Image (spheres, coloured by chain):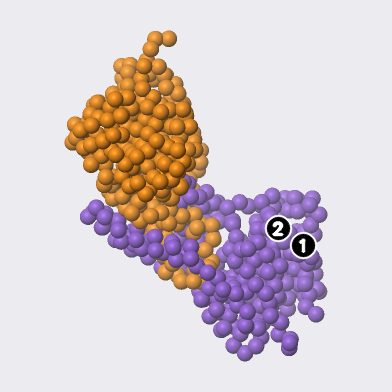
Chain colours: A orange, B purple
Amino acid sequence: MTSSSVCVLGLGLIGGSILRAAHDAGRPVWGWNRSADAIAGATADGYDVGTDLKAALTRASDQDALIVVAVPMPAVDSVLAAIAEHAPAAPITDVVSVKAEVAAAVTARGLQARYVGGHPMAGTNQSGWSATDPTLFTDAVWVVSTDRGVDADVWVRVAQLALDCGSVVVPAESVEHDRAVARISHLPHLLAEALAMVGAAGGPLALGLAAGSFRDGTRVASSSPNLVRAMTEGNAAALRTALDEALAALTAAREELDEGSTKTLVDAGNAARLQYEQHQRFEITDITPGEPGWREELQDAGRRGGVVRQIRSASPG
Amino acid sequence: MTSSSVCVLGLGLIGGSILRAAHDAGRPVWGWNRSADAIAGATADGYDVGTDLKAALTRASDQDALIVVAVPMPAVDSVLAAIAEHAPAAPITDVVSVKAEVAAAVTARGLQARYVGGHPMAGTNQSGWSATDPTLFTDAVWVVSTDRGVDADVWVRVAQLALDCGSVVVPAESVEHDRAVARISHLPHLLAEALAMVGAAGGPLALGLAAGSFRDGTRVASSSPNLVRAMTEGNAAALRTALDEALAALTAAREELDEGSTKTLVDAGNAARLQYEQHQRFEITDITPGEPGWREELQDAGRRGGVVRQIRSASPG
């Protein structure tokens, strides 16, 4: 029987919320964090957490726990080095918002055989233990990697953790994930920053007149600059493409505005927003991880809007 | 004694909501709308509305009612022509989202002596009588024009209507208003349209991964293209400046991204958003419309973030 234990490394908003959600789902779970101060609240709340990385990983190795790497990108490699030393055979996932860069770091440490990347698409505006929430992932989308070479058993364990946390699973290749989030998560940050700048340049009169469109359009500009830089800079290649597309649309609009019209941009933007509003997920029900072609089939279904809500067992039936 | 009657021309979301809010404030109010179909709901709800423009204006003239022009920009001039014919001495305001263009049309009809422009900064995503709401303006900001030549008595009547509808009044010159709303209302629409386009170009995978930042960043792209075009095209000159600033910030960010950094944009955008969050209005309490210099003083106070919450009487005491 597969171990249901979970070992969470890094107890910020995402890692801490996974610790709590996995606990609430009845799974044995423990966590590690570099700083003791940051997890005083977790300790006080009775969670099984500590600052001894070797101890956490040795236990993960002994219990065949799923290791969840939930530290910021700059700290990922040092955590992977510790995993390679103390729990080289344990299954590994992560929750970093870019996937290709993490996959490359995992491969560089020789851990790729037991690694399946993940990315829960859940809020990151706040931070720290006090902001953690076991329901953060409820009805959220959790990307689970379908990169060439992923192990079906590890894939199922990562997907099951996402489902246990209340999410639906979107299967996607790391590179495709990174291109998609550049469009729908990283570009929104850059546009929000630019909008905030132009608004504030209008002084107190402009800021005083700002209503819903400015408030919503700049909301994510209140995110910590360090978090935003880590996300956007970690996905620079894909983000360049998305930003170039936005610049092309806005530059064309600027030219049309010289003729007094905004028709092309407004019509296309409205149609695109309706496409988003009408987007329907479908449930992937006919693919069993481990069976021939499962990885490519999942990836193709994810690309077409498919999500996994329940893991199909590879056992006959 | 000044008449408290109000005559609302055009009963869409804004005009209809003013009709209802003024009624709830205990003011005699009637409305006109070009199409009978659109106000069947208003009639059924017992409001005093009709489709006879001459009758509505004659009554306004007889009762010295404040006329509120609440039709879309393209229909403004024909309504002004009717006012010039049937109620040339009545005080006039409007609620169109651009101010300089309306002021010019008013002057062209020779109605400028009794006109004070207005703009309630309240939502326009929905439309029609069923969307009207007497609380739409509660705690909203309502710009009242301080253009050269405005009449103090009319200014007070327009400001009082805004206060009766639950808003605070921001005094501002038409041109300054238009520059400010280009930054905080019209530019957000253009950026939202562009973001929606880039997101949808990522197909079902990207749309399926879209979470809060994309949803909020594209929200106003769901507004009716006709409304968005009317707003943005009606304010083309000021919007060009705002769009150029956004393009400059994003183009610089694109270059910095080639070096792998987003620091300049992210730091500046975050600081700007904090400026917005920390923006504090102050109440203008020491200016009495009609006293020497009142117009320039109000305008200056509005520019610095001042709002009027109560009208000071010009009578001694």
Q: Could you say which is closer to the camera, residue B71 or residue B310?
A: B310
Quick one: quadrant of the N terminus of chain B?
A: bottom right
- Marks 1 and 2, Cα distance to the nearest angstrom? 9 Å
The residue that label 1 is drawn on is B23
Mark 1 or mark 2: which comes first in sequence?
1
In what element is the residue under mark 1?
helix
Q: What residue is drawn where x is 70% and y is 58%?
A: B134
Q: What residue is drawn where x is 62% and y is 82%?
A: B286
Query: Residue A91's spot in the image, x, y percent?
Result: 29, 27
Q: Is residue B8 visible?
A: yes
Q: Is residue B178 visible?
A: no
Q: What residue is drawn where x is 33% and y is 54%?
A: A226
Q: Amino acid at mark 1?
A: His
Query: Residue B288's spot in the image, x, y percent?
Result: 65, 83
Query: Residue B246's spot in the image, x, y percent?
Result: 38, 62
**Label 1 with label 2: CB-CB less than 8 Å:** yes
Q: Amino acid at mark 2?
A: Pro
Quick one: quadrant of the C terminus of chain B?
A: bottom right
Q: Could you say which is closer to the camera, residue B77 or residue A131?
A: A131
Which picture quadrant has residue A294? top left
| Chain designation of label 2 | B
Q: Residue furthest top?
A: A317
Q: Is residue B19 left or right of residue A6?
A: right
Crowd around label 2: few <14 · some 14–19 · many ≥20 (10 Å): some
In what element is the residue under mark 2?
loop
Query: Residue A181's spot in the image, x, y percent?
Result: 36, 43
Question: Which mark, by number, is residue B134?
Answer: 2
| Chain designation of label 1 | B
Question: Which mark, by number, is residue B218?
Answer: none
Q: Is residue A218 above or below residue A304?
A: below
